[in-house]
């Protein structure tokens, strides 16, 4: 058990100071192991690393125009991100998702991909809104060791794009980005759409067609309680079952095998390529197989997306903590991971931070 009496940036001060100042609570000390386990028997193998909390979009289900960013001085350096990934790898994490905010706004993204691309991780993916992508960049990432790219696209109607993302990147540009990463071989390409009642839920079959036409994995996501506007209501969620029923009016779906830790239930079509997947975080939670841990851009480590329990590793990095101390920090944090989020329960308390801050 290590004890560092310093917390992360200003956002974390709004949370329980005691909790923040005591990287994971003493009753949750992990047993000795060279792997990351939580106290519910799950091995943690997947690190979701947010390299920036900045974003050039203001998606209505995620962030707001008046979003307050972390001070630049609170963000980790390139070397600190790389060191964290090395520590994670030494603890059996073999999957890395680079996210944000919008990761392509991180000025040292290319160098970061070059460094983590050489570490021997089994799977390195990057999630982006597709606004800053070029063939040259995608090829550079591929050559540097990135395996896959996931692109977010919530509508296929040009007129809706601005209203949902509150940005001026065109639909054409994002679709071109999807085709580019597929052609460069950053595959399988996943495309994420958050389905919102009364906003884009009339497009679910169009997304199925899009998956076929572009030979990609389209994933329809249930709206989660992580929006800055705090508009989320359980009864408003378009469930995966509802989406699937609509799609089955036009397509015959065949269930694909998913891994235990898969976030989506995936289907092929009897006709045509591509796949459609449903991320039913609210209606059919997949917490039992969750193998993820997250780190925000300022070094705040959060074992569960929906729990405000989190601890900051930045001061340890800055104070020259040993690899062994950093490993112990991660093991204690993983051990404290909640069993599940309870978003489908009436006593669910929504997390204080938004998806753009935590990292999707
Ligand atoms: N900016 C990048 C992007 O949009 O792909 C990466 C970060 S974004 C936070 C990662 C993913 O989180 C996106 O696919 C986005 O659709 C999803 N997301 C954000 N807010 C969400 C919410 N309230 N419910 C469900 N998914 C959400
Ligand atoms: Fe930005 Fe991604 Fe959030 Fe949209 S979903 S506001 S692109 S971080």
Image: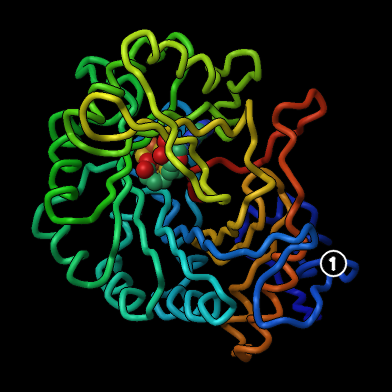
| Image quarter for ligand 1 | top left
Residue that badge 1 annotates: 28
- Examine the image and state in which quarter residue 110 appears: bottom left
Rendered location of residue 61, percent (x, y) = 48, 28
356 relative position to 275: left or right = right
Rendered location of residue 87, percent (x, y) = 54, 80
Could you tell me if residue 58 is visible in this image? no
Q: Does 101 sit above or below residue 269?
A: below
Rendered location of residue 195, percent (x, y) = 44, 22
What crowding class fits label 1: few (fewer than 14 Cα within 10 Å), some (14-19), or many (20 or more)?
A: some
Rendered location of residue 307, percent (x, y) = 71, 47
Q: In which quadrant is the N terminus drawn?
A: bottom right
Q: Nearer the viewer, residue 260 or 359?
A: 260
Judged from this view, the residue extending furthest toward the left is 136
The image shows a total of numbered marks equal to: 1
Residue ID at (24%, 21%):
209
Residue ID at (83%, 73%):
29
- Examine the image and state in which quarter residue 299 appears: bottom right
Q: Does 30 sit above or below residue 197?
A: below
SS category of the residue bearing label 1: helix
């Amino acid at each position: 058990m290590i004890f560092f009496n310093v917390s992360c940036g200003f956002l974390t001060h709004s949370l329980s100071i005691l909790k923040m100042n005591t990287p994971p609570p003493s009753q949750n000390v992990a047993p000795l192991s060279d792997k990351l386990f939580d106290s519910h028997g799950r091995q943690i193998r997947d690190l979701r690393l947010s390299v920036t909390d900045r974003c050039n979009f203001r998606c209505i289900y995620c962030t707001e125009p008046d979003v307050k960013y972390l001070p630049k001085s609170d963000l980790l350096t390139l070397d600190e991100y790389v060191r964290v990934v090395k520590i994670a790898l030494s603890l059996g994490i073999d999957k890395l998702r680079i996210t944000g905010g919008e990761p392509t706004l991180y000025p040292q993204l290319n160098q970061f991909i070059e460094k983590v691309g050489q570490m021997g991780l089994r799977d390195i993916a990057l999630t982006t809104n597709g606004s800053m992508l070029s063939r040259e960049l995608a090829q550079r990432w591929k050559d540097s060791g990135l395996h896959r790219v996931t692109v977010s696209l919530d509508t296929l109607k040009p007129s809706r794009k601005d209203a949902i993302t509150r940005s001026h990147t065109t639909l054409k540009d994002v679709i071109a980005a999807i085709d580019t990463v597929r052609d460069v071989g950053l595959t399988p390409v996943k495309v994420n759409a958050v389905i919102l009642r009364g906003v884009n839920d009339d497009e679910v079959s169009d997304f199925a067609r899009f998956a076929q036409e572009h030979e990609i994995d389209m994933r329809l996501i249930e709206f989660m309680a992580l929006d800055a506007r705090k508009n989320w209501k359980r009864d408003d969620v378009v469930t995966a079952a509802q989406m699937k029923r609509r799609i089955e009016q036009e397509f015959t779906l065949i269930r694909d095998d998913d891994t235990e830790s898969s976030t989506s239930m995936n289907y092929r079509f009897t006709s045509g390529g591509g796949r459609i997947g449903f991320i039913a975080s609210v209606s059919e939670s997949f917490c039992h197989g969750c193998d993820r841990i997250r780190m925000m851009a300022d070094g705040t480590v959060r074992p569960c997306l929906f729990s405000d329990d989190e601890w900051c590793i930045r001061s340890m990095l800055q104070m020259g903590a040993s690899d062994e101390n950093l490993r112990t920090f991660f093991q204690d944090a993983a051990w404290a991971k909640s069993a599940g989020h309870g978003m489908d329960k009436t006593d669910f308390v929504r997390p204080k931070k938004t998806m753009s801050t935590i990292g999707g």
